[in-house]
Structure formats: C-alpha cells, structure tokens
Image (tube, rainbow, N blue to C red):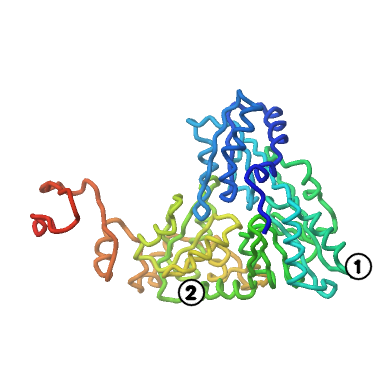
Amino acid sequence: MNKTNDDQQQQRFDIEHCIDWINHIGPGNVCLYFMSEFYRYACKIVKQLQEKLPNIRFFIMITCTTGPETLPFRLQDNNSHIDAAIYFGCDCLCPEKYTKTLPILFITLLPLDDEFDYILEFVDQEFGDLSDKNVLLLSDLTYSSYLTPVAHKIQLKSDSHETKIETTKFVKPQQENWYLEPRISNLFENVDAFSIVQYPYRLKNNLSDYDCILFLGECQDLEMIISCKKMLMIDPMKQTFRTLDGAKEFRKRISLIEKFKIPNNKSIGIVYKDFQSSISSSMKNVRVLCKRAKKLPYFISLNQSDFESRLGNFTQLTGFVFINVCRCVYRMATELSRYLYPVILWKEFQIASGHNIVYGGIEWNENFAINHDDDDDDDYGSNEFNDEQNLMIIERNQQQKLNSNDSWYGLIVDVGSTAIESIKSGRSGIASNYDNEQELF
C-alpha cells in the first residue's frame, strides 16, 4: 500500500478556503476540531493558519468517540470566548451534536489517486460485473468529495452501460450558521429524483431495494445499517474494509427488545445525554409508555464521557433506555449490547411498549398511539403497580437496603452524613507486610 507522508496528507484539507472563511467571518478566537484519525496533522495545520492569520487565536479541541458530545458546551464556555469553529472531518450531521450559536465550517478530505485505485480494485473483487446488481454509493461528510469521481470511474471501468450504481444527495442543513466547502455544494442540491429522505441523505429508492450499500468512511447510523441488506464500509485512508449484515444487526436489536420486555425487568432507567433541548415532553411520553408496559421509570442524567461504566452504579435497575441521542449511535449501541441488562434506544422502547412506529423498514404495533389523557400520576399508586415488590421509586435512603441483598455492589459514599471516628496514618513502601496491617484492614 502506497502511503503518503504527513506533509502531503495535511495538504489534503483546503486550508486556503479556511483562511478565506475566517477573513469573511472575522472571529477573534477559532476552535479547530479534528477527528481522531487527523490528530497528527493538527499542529502543522495550526502553524499554517497562524502564519497567514497572526492576529487570530486558535484552539485545538478533541472529544471522545463513544460518550456524549460535550463539544457544543465547551464551545459556549464563557471562559474560552470562542467565536467560530472549523471541523476537519465529520461523520455525523445531526444538529444536536453542534452548537446552535457559533458559525461552523465543515472541511472535507481531498482524495488521492492511490485511494481511488484501492476503492476500484475492491469493487472489482467484491462485485465483478455490476450489471446485475443494484449498488448504492454513500459516504460520510469527510469523504463526500469522493462520491462523484468514484461513481464516474466505476462507470468508465465497467464493460456494461447498464451498471446500476447510484450515488446520494445530502439534505441541506437548516442551520444558517453552517458553512460548507463550495466544491461539495452540488451534493446538497434539492433534486426531485432524490425524493426519499433518511437524514442526512436523499435517496432515489428505499435502502432495502439495494443489493448492497458501499459506504466510504464510517457509518454510525444504526437505523440505516439495520434497514439495508448488506453494507460494505471502506476506509480510503487506511485502505481497510468491513462487512455488515443488516439482517443480523437487526436481529441483535430485536433480541434486546425482547429481553427488555421480560416481566421481571420492572424498574428501568431512562437515560438522558443531551440537555440542549427541552425534555419535558419526552418525560411525559415515557410515563405513558411505561404505564402501558408495566414498567416504572427512574430518570437518570448521564452527561459524562464514561457513561457506559456508570450504568453499573444502578444495581437496582434491570434495563435502560437512552432517550435523546442522535441517529449516529451504532458504535455506542454495539458496546452497550454487551452489558448485563438490556440497553435500548427510544424507538426500540416504543416498540417494546406497543407503540406504532416504523423501525428497520418494518411497521410495528399498527393499532396503538400515545394517549396523554391516560397519563395520571395517581395510576402509579394503583394495585396494578403495588402488587409487585420490585416496582418502586428508588429513594436515597432505600439504596443501602436494596444493595444489601446483592451478591456484590460498589461502594456507597455519603459524604458528611457521619462523623469520622479516627484517622490512621498511611505507610510508604511496598504494598504488603505493613507492621499494622491487621489494624488497618
């Protein structure tokens, strides 16, 4: 595999357009966000920008890949005084992941010839003659500039003029302060032929109509993955690929839904990760659906990057629902599927509660809709709920009593509730054979 050096790689971003955009916006402080695969170019790119724009202060920011997106909050920190942001690479266009107030520029990656060669060679080995296959070519925003030339090269290389490979359009963002590079603006045109919208894409046909989806970059849209027959994800930079079976991934989600519906799983955690928008309406919907499913909700705020490990602190709960997350949750959903108790998403919770919804290309529970007239707080005190011992709100003073019945549980810390009886001196040295070991332990 022919690898270019870092100097060549960093020039794949349109730095000149970044400079023109900054001059047009006129900010004093600019945040530069880099995807993890572009970290090693960050310092050199900042140096290039500083040489051209010496009066601008630049900040490099990174964020975790699995936790909640905290970057919008950091950008609005009064102490940072950030005026604008530039994203170098982007695998998610869900508006809730971005600040609503600052102007943002999205920079895509310029393709290289050896990456085109790898993609074409892969397509030839995987599909051979494309005349009898219906293939959809997609990408995340990072690799969006590859779409048109890759489709054109595949068409030229094919012996048949009936090659059925289609590309996609992107939904034009409604955010007035989002800026895109001019060379990819044609991908955001509103064309009548692309009438099916599955944000952030516009498609000509349903995903299930294609024999395979060829995705350049990293697809994190769980609903898209479970709705297609087969997806081949290609990383042009690393020149690697992996295959996802949509039906297999869908069966995994269905098994979690069925596990969540088990009658013994009565007390459930409703987990909120994003508080940029109001959650009052969703809380009301949760109560209605929990009443129907005979579950008692326990509302949890987990706005930390290590939220996966924090779920283990709630030993009294036997299932979790993540409510206000964006569409790009495939990696998170895959990791949480290994948890002891079922962890599902909002649409999956609606299915488990009997709500009529379309998910994975299937319409579920056709004869049910949420009725808020049935939402009465007094209903949680009815015999239907009181007959079950596990169906209770977990109060602070009940926690130790509940945990005392567990075979194992974490430490319970209640700072300041009891006076310290004594303070013992610590010891230095190797962690064994202390002279007062028995006294300490």
* Residue ID at (48%, 75%): 259
In three-dimensional space, the C-alpha distance between marks 2 and 1, rounded to whole angstroms, equals 51 Å
Q: Is residue 123 left or right of residue 74?
A: right
| x then y, percent, for residue 104 | 65, 39
| x then y, percent, for residue 211 | 75, 73
Amino acid type, label 1: His
Residue denoted by label 1: 161
| x then y, percent, for residue 83 | 59, 31
Q: Earlier in the sequence, mark 2 or mark 1?
A: 1
User: Element at badge 2?
Assistant: loop
User: Element at badge 1?
Assistant: loop
Q: Quadrant of the N terminus?
A: bottom right
The answer to whether 399 is drawn above or below residue 292 in the figure is above
Crowd band around label 2 with a 10 angstrom C-alpha radius: few (<14), some (14–19), many (20+): many
| x then y, percent, for residue 334 | 53, 65
* Frontmost residue, 138 versus 272: 138
Q: Is residue 155 visible?
A: yes
* Residue ID at (67%, 62%): 234
The answer to whether 415 is drawn above or below residue 236 in the figure is above
Q: Are marks 2 and 1 in contact (CB under 8 Å)?
A: no
* Residue ID at (77%, 49%): 188
Residue denoted by label 2: 261
